[in-house]
Image (tube, rainbow, N blue to C red):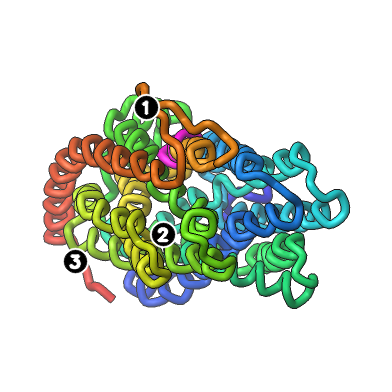
Amino acid sequence: MSFFNFNYNFKRESITHEQQRKNWKIEFFKTYMVVCLGYAVMYLVRNNFKAAQPFMKEQFEFTTTDLGWIGLGFSISYGIGRTLIGYFFDGKNTKKILAVLLGISGILAIIIGITLATLGKTIGFLIILWTINGAIQSTGGPCSASTIRRWVTDTRRGTWQGIWNISHNIGGALAGIIALGAANIFFGGNVYGMFIFPGLIALFLGIVGLFIGKGDPRELGWGSIEEIFEEPSVSSEMEASSMSKKEIVIKYIIKNPFIWLLCFANIFVYILRIGVDNWAPLYVTESLNFSGTVAVNTIFFFEIGGFVGSLVWGWISDKLGGRRIFLSVVCLIVMPFAYGMYQTGSLVIVIYISLFLIGLLVFGPISLIGISVIDFAPKQATTVASAIPGTFGYIFGDAIAKVAIARIADPEENGLKIFGRVLHGWNDQFILFYVSIAAAVLLLVFVAIEENKRCVIRKKQIEQYRKENSYEAV
């Protein structure tokens, strides 16, 4: 792991913090480009599977349940890997780690494409490969969050992490278009091309990303980001500096009730996200009899809505003084209107609009829970803290959205019995969505109250610190 350790063996540059602030944008954007572009491309070798599902059914006779089990393997390994692998990555150069993970994920996608081309329908092998891909991709988001936190102060993090969050919306939106286009142009329309071509892109950019930017401003001989922008470190970070990684995780994460509330809320938020994102292509083809082209476009409109949501919600939360969970609750309260349009719509344009609105709203809590959970933990535990809600989201929320909805929607199955009621058919998936909205709101209200108290205290600390120390913004 020495390759991934930070290298601080530079001569300390004799430049003032004011000069470091002036040079910060150039150095930050080198690294920021790597984490944004790298995470976007990760979705090219993730959402390509979603776009490929109708064609896998057509060309290789996969069933809806088959596809659900393959997706489940990814969800479980992705969820577990976020926390377990993230624990070992904390304190490492997560910018380098992200680039390596991207390259490996690209290799796996190429292997999957070759497997389909040579062996055809091999459920067991595909589950294994897609499960490994889930583990490899699991810490892509936490590694990005850790890198951003080393380069951005807490008062600006909502904006910059929100902008970063659109990278996976861009990657997700383009995944189906790029995969299908490449398959048609270079592979004669064969579905295995939807894996090989995105895999080649990921491998190339993973290699390039290793050599651009630094994982921490101190690698340049600068101070920490708090020193550069002259903001006080939060008390938890000062205390955590003298603690072991295990002690930090136990005190600030395992024993923190608000992180657990965020984790359980994230289960229901992921049901809302994945239940639409994963199944929209099949829903519109099987329930509404739309074409395969429209099916691929559903991913685009959902992700474009998420793109806008990720872009604005983080910025708005900064303007609200860091009240990220309050804003999440607002998004959830409005959400039933968008899901209602999706449920009752029968025209292509209505479905597109509803998917855009769902993406816009659901990526409020999706992005803000990820930002908020970091606020509750010191910098030394950023990777694992940002990973834990995702672990819950993927192991439980993602799995429920994939396997449960697959069983509910599959005409060859008998539906799913919940509390004495049998849910069967595409329309019954919406019962799961509305229950998830209510549960998420109930859990997040408690976090929003605590968050408001913390925001008031933090604002006073920064104002007092800047009164006592000269500060010139750049």
Residue visible at 70% across and 63% down in the picture: 194
Circle 2 residue: 223
Instruction: Tell me which amino acid carries mark 2.
Output: Gly
From the viewer's side, name the closer residue of 412 and 225. 412
Membership of 390 in magenta stretch: yes
Residue 41, numbered circle: none
| Residue type at the position of mark 1 | Arg
Instruction: State the image coordinates of residue 203 (x, y, percent, origin top left).
Output: 72, 63
Q: Which of labels 1 and 2 is toward the front?
A: 1
Give the CA distance from mark 3 to mark 1: 65 Å
Instruction: Look at mark 1 in the image and give the residue it sits on.
Output: 421
Residue drawn where x is 73% and y is 70% of the image: 183
| Image-based side of 283 in relation to 9, left or right | left
Q: Which residue has dot 3 on it?
A: 470
Which badge, 1 or 2, is on the more N-terminal residue? 2
Q: Residues within 10 Å of mark 3 (few under 14, many from 20)?
A: few
As rendered, which of 98 and 235 lies closer to the eye? 98
Question: x, y percentage for residue 44?
Answer: 61, 62
Q: Secondary structure at mark 3?
A: loop
Within 10 Å of the Cα at label 2, are there few (<14), some (14-19), or many (20+) other Cα atoms? some
Local SS, label 1: strand
Quarter occupied by the N terminus? top right
Magenta part of the chain: 387-396
Which circle's residue, 3 or 2, is located before the other in the chain? 2
Disc 3 versus disc 2: distance between alpha carbons? 17 Å
Separation of marks 1 and 2 at Cα, in angstroms = 60 Å
